[in-house]
Amino acid sequence: MGTKSAKPKQILVFSPYALWTFHTVYEGTIAKACRLRGAEVTYLLCDGLPECDQHWFSKAGGPRPDDICQRCRAASSTNVGPSEFPSQWIGQYLSPAERDEVTSWAASLQPQEFSSATFRHLPLGEWVISSINSYFRQFPPDLTSSAVVQVFRNFLVSAGLVGIALANYLDRNSVDSAILFNGRQSITRVAMEILIARGIRVLTHERGEYQREHLNARANAHCMSPLPFASFWKTWGGIPLTRHELEEARMWLVQRRYGANPAWIQFSKTVSAESVRRQLRIPKSKRLLALFTSSTDEVAGDPLMQGPYPSQEDWVRDVIEWVRNHKQVELVIKVHPNLGGNSYIGAATHELNFYQRIRTSLPENVQMVMPEDNVSAYSLAEEADFGLTFGSIIGLEMALLGKPVLLASRAVYEHAPAFLTVRSREELTALLEKSLHPSDGREIQRQAFRIAYYAMCVCDMPFPKVTVESLYHARENFQNTTELAPGMDPSLDRICRFLVEDGPLFEQPSAVDLARTNAEEDAFLDELATSPHSFREQRLERWLRLRSTGRMVKSILLRLPFGAGEKILKISRPGWHSMLKSVEVGKMAANSK
């Protein structure tokens, strides 16, 4: 008798946001790799909802376009993935009676009930609040506004419809594993929670958090959840780094300081030669504390992201009151530059207004740097004696310089003992007292390098099978699917092991890993201590000068009459950008060999 072959793994790609083609390229590439390993892949697409994350008022500055669902459906048929895998629509799994049920439920809610609203025992209010925050860049949402109320109600309708449709789909179809975009935003959060509750393995994906052509892939968690790295750190945090790994972490910080290789819009000004103490007239005799705020609209209202403080504003007030009574200290509050808005999203006026209000009544030993002020966060971090954050990644960057850091919320570095993590509001004062005294910079730096390497270079996976062409465009980087086969790419192997083989996303330390000592770390940190330019790179300084020259030349050309300058720019732009890219990545490539 012959042996019965194993049943192929059934993988569902929940892909409702077809207009975001940047992300569909990644899930399409993963789907093809899973198929090569014997899995059967099906797509579930969106054919129309009253509200979703394809439009935010904070980005567009206006109402939701009438044709957005039509454009999204059209994009679905041509995206990587749906064009070559079987696909179905959400609407196929909804009856008219079910649609009416959801609409009636949402219509019956009072605005004050929205955030805690449940439908068929699903906490939809909690699951969509992150999108409401991003939609208007305000938390809590302004429920006195009829526009906010209508959008919130429509998000609840969309969440209810997706909840029913996905449940119906799962009742009728076998699914072993699922792939979906980020798991944070409204209907993707609904899908993730329902899939996990059914015992289905879920891989969420987002663009790399801090490096271009990396992928933020998480197992059974949304893209901003602190839990996956907490678990990874528990296993790997005690494993010392090799020289090569330390160098990768160093280069990550170097890139950040120069604004090179970003995964997203660069918010902070690059490191400057100008002294912040001189800029802000801070005497050298004073101990300089730097408080870096965070942009909190993406995570506010999520119980998983809640720290000891109900809000960042409460923490900032507490720190200011402590500093008021310590005249030997100068506190500089650096307001997160993202709050001022950028080319992608509008200003977070609600948060900005808080800082504008308190700015007029600060103690004499407290200064505030607003998003528009010409003060580099990296220069401030370099000169500060002590850092304070509400989760900002610059806390890790300061620690890489050997600086002590206090953390007052959730962050990737919250579990490292060398960081002063506030676990309750009552212990803040005692922790702030430690800012008055020197710290063990060596141990801070050691743990910071491990976190930077494991979080930014391992968990934030290199993903060379997709090429990032711009902030909004990516493409496949392989000639044929044999390049996605087992053994061809470590990141794809990890992802497929999780989705197809029921294995872990990341390996356990090997016997060789467990036998490592601190010797290579100690030698590396000794070198950093004796080199004044450890975090400088001449090639990237040249790259910054070239970019500055390019902006100046562009400004001159655009003044030419008859559109001549624009024509010159159009001809020369591809070559110029290619040259800039080669200068930007050249040194990084050399360091990664």
Image (cartoon, rainbow, N blue to C red):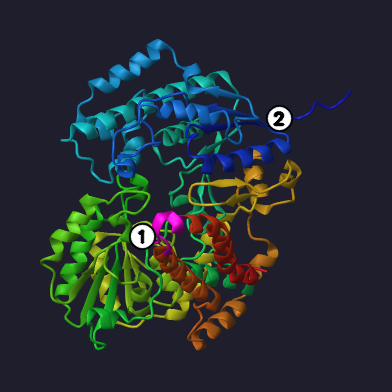
Q: Which residues are magenta?
A: 557-566
Which percent across, then down, holds residue 328? 20, 83
Dominant secondary structure of the magenta stretch? helix
- Front residue of this view, candidates 387 and 122: 387
Residue 385 appears in the rendering: yes
The quadrant holding residue 13 is top right
Q: Residue visible at 21% across and 50% down? A: 350
- Identify the amino acid type marked 1: Gly
Badge 2 marks a residue whose secondary structure is loop
| Residue 168 included in the magenta stretch of the image | no
The answer to whether residue 291 is above or below residue 126 is below
Report whether 285 appears left or right of 181: left
Q: Nearer the viewer, residue 453 or 96?
A: 96
Q: Which residue is mark 2?
A: 8
Q: Position of residue 235 (x, y in %)?
A: 56, 59
Give the residue pinned by disc 1.
391
Q: Secondary structure at mark 1?
A: loop
The residue shown at (23%, 82%) is: 282
Residue sitting at the far front = 562
Residue 240 seen in the current view:
no
State left or right for residue 197 relative to residue 372. Answer: right
Q: Earlier in the sequence, mark 1 or mark 2?
A: 2
Q: CA distance from mark 1 to mark 2?
A: 42 Å
x then y, percent, for residue 123: 34, 32
Does residue 30 appear left or right of residue 558 in this picture? right
The quarter of the rendered structure image containing the N terminus is top right
Circle 1 crowding by C-alpha within 10 Å: few under 14, some 14–19, many from 20? many
Q: Quadrant of the C terminus?
A: bottom right
